[in-house]
Every structure is written in C-alpha cells, then in structure tokens.
C-alpha cells in the first residue's frame, strides 16, 4: 500500500496475511488449501470432502457454523462458505471406528453380565418367596413322637393351615408354639426339609393320674396339665382326691410329684392318692394298705421300707421319715 507521501508501507501491505492463523498450512499444490486472509476470495473448487469457496473481498473472520461447515467473513461484507461434500462421520479414521465399536461391544457385554448377575437372584427370590414350587406339601410333612396324649388328628389339624405356604416364609417358631398349645403336646420342634417338606418332632405328655370333677374325670399329667375329660376313670391310673381349684394347687402338684417319683413296682399298686398339704401325701394301695408318704423326697428308701414292712404284715405305714418308719 502507498501512503500519502507516495511511499510504499510494508506494514500496510494487504498482499500479506494480516492474520497468520487464518492461513492454511497446506502446500499451494493441494486443491483444498484455504484462501489466505486479506486476499480476495475467488470462487474455486475445494476438492473432495471440502466443497466450494464462494464470495468476494478480503477475509477478515472464520467461524465454524456446524459439522462440516466453515463461514468466512470478508471486509466488503461478502461471506465465504466452506461446505463439506462428504458426511463428517465418513471422514473418521477406520482405526478409530474399530476402537469405538470395540468399546460399544465391551459396554454391551458388561450390561449383559450385570443383567445376568441381577436376574438370577431375582428369579430365585421369586421362586422361593412366591412360587408354589417351593411351598409346603401335605405329603412331605413328617411327624415323629406321636403317642401318649399327643393325638395325630389334632397335630394334623394344627399343621393344615401351613400347607401351601412357601417354605422360606414359614416361621417355624409359630408352628411350634401352636403345636404346644395342644394339651397332649409337651414340646414340639419344627425344621424345614427343602424344598417342600417339614420335619416335626413331638414330645407328648403322659397321663399320670385322674381326678374326679363332678360327673366327669379329668386326666392329668405329672405337671397337672389337664389332658382330657372322660366319663369314666381309665384303668391303670391312680385316682387323685384333691379339689381342682387354685387353693389346692400346691397340694395337687406335690401329690403328682410323689406319684411320678414312685418306683414302677409300687406305682402299679396305688389305687388312690390324697394330700392334706404339700408334705402330707397319703397313698392307698389296691391291697388295702395305707401309706403315709409325706413329700416326694427319698422315694427309693421309702419304697424299700414299705416293701419290708408289708412282708411283716403291716397295713398302715408312715414313711415320712424313712429312717424311722412307723407301723400299725
């Protein structure tokens, strides 16, 4: 450019690029070289993948308008637009495409593993908690220990509501508590038998005595639990003459303790038993012999003294102090 004095000013020479960063680093021989900033933008073919450069004037600004599009502003108001004639995705290097596909496959594989890891426990939980496949079946319930006062029909009735319940949801403590509510069951133990069974072990109560209560007879076990009411006294059980009330509770329990502690050979001879107090138990043998027994202490020593004195013809024997028995 020439200044007013007619001298050429190199610093204002518009033939040079005023913005070096706008100048393409490609060689002039390549068809897609950008037009240097500060020079007129002539229509030209940009070559494969770059498009056409159109416009006029001197370039002053370059902006990216979108994928594959550059907008260049000229000082005369014209614009130069560079449009790609190829899809930007097609210009991605093949090696990069392969890495991207490999990463996508790895993510899918990871998602598959997580789905499998979460799906198996979820399916198993549904199978155990909600499916009838793992529910209690009537034919898979095994009950052991029935006998004495524990009646099979009563035990089966207690277990019936639990049939069909998923085994994992079964509360064995609840089943045990309900079984032990039966008069004839002293203790119950329930365990799961996978996948659909139960194992029930019952300790039955054993009848120890019978007591008259009005027109009926009540069968008692050794703890005084009322097992059953019957119209007639069953044979083989000593009849207890103690009122069934709270006031006589301790005397009744002491009498039952004595009956339970008797040696079998003597217990089989007892026909009737009564108690005036906790330590005042009296036994009446079937032979007519009366025994003042006292409490449940030293049963073997008392039984030995009774057997010896009966051989000597005694019909009334006081063994409350077995070391010094008294006879009549």
Image (cartoon, rainbow, N blue to C red):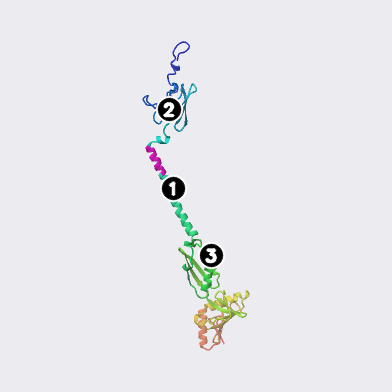
Residue furthest out toward the top: 5
User: Relative to residue 17, is residue 174 drawn left or right?
Assistant: right
Coordinates of residue 22 in the picture (x, y in percent)? 44, 25
Q: Upstream in the sequence, badge 1 or badge 2?
A: 2
- Disc on res. 280: none
- Disc on res. 111: 1
CA separation in Å, label 1 and label 2: 45 Å
Report the front residue among 119 and 168. Answer: 119
Report the front residue among 44 and 324. Answer: 44
Which residues fall within the magenta stretch?
A: 94-104
For the residue carrying disc 1, how many other residues have a C-alpha within 10 Å: few (<14), some (14-19), or many (20+)? few
The residue under label 3 is 174
User: Relative to residue 118, is residue 180 drawn left or right?
Assistant: right
Q: Is residue 212 magenta?
A: no
Q: Quadrant of residue 24?
A: top left
The quarter of the rendered structure image containing the N terminus is: top left
Q: Secondary structure at mark 2?
A: strand
Q: Is residue 94 visible?
A: yes
The residue under label 2 is 52
């Amino acid at each position: 450019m020439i200044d007013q004095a007619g001298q050429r000013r190199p610093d204002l020479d518009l033939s040079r690029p005023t913005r070096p960063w706008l100048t393409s680093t490609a060689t002039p021989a390549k068809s897609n070289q950008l037009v240097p900033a500060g020079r007129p933008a002539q229509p030209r073919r940009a070559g494969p993948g770059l498009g056409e450069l159109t416009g006029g004037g001197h370039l002053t600004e370059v902006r990216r308008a979108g994928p594959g599009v550059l907008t260049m502003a000229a000082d005369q108001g014209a614009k130069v637009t560079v449009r790609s004639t190829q899809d930007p995705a097609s210009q991605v290097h093949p090696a990069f495409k392969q890495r991207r596909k490999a990463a996508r496959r790895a993510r899918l594989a990871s998602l598959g593993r997580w789905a499998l890891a979460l799906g198996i426990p979820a399916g198993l939980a549904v199978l155990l908690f909600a499916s009838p496949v793992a529910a209690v079946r009537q034919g898979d319930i095994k009950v052991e220990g029935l006998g004495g006062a524990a009646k099979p029909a009563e035990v089966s009735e207690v277990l019936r509501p639990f049939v069909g319940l998923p085994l994992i949801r079964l509360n064995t403590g609840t089943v045990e508590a309900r079984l032990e509510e039966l008069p004839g069951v002293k203790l119950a133990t329930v365990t799961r038998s996978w996948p659909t069974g139960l194992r029930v072990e019952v300790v039955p109560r054993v009848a120890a005595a019978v007591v008259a209560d009005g027109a009926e007879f009540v069968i008692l076990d050794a703890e005084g639990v009322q097992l059953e009411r019957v119209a007639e006294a069953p044979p083989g059980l000593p009849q207890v003459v103690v009122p069934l009330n709270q006031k006589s509770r301790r005397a009744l329990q002491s009498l039952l303790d004595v009956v339970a502690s008797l040696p079998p050979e003597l217990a089989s001879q007892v026909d009737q038993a009564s108690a005036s107090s906790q330590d005042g138990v009296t036994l009446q043998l079937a032979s007519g012999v009366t025994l003042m027994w006292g409490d449940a202490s030293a049963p073997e020593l008392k039984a030995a003294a009774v057997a010896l004195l009966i051989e000597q013809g005694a019909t009334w024997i006081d063994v409350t102090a077995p070391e010094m028995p008294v006879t009549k």
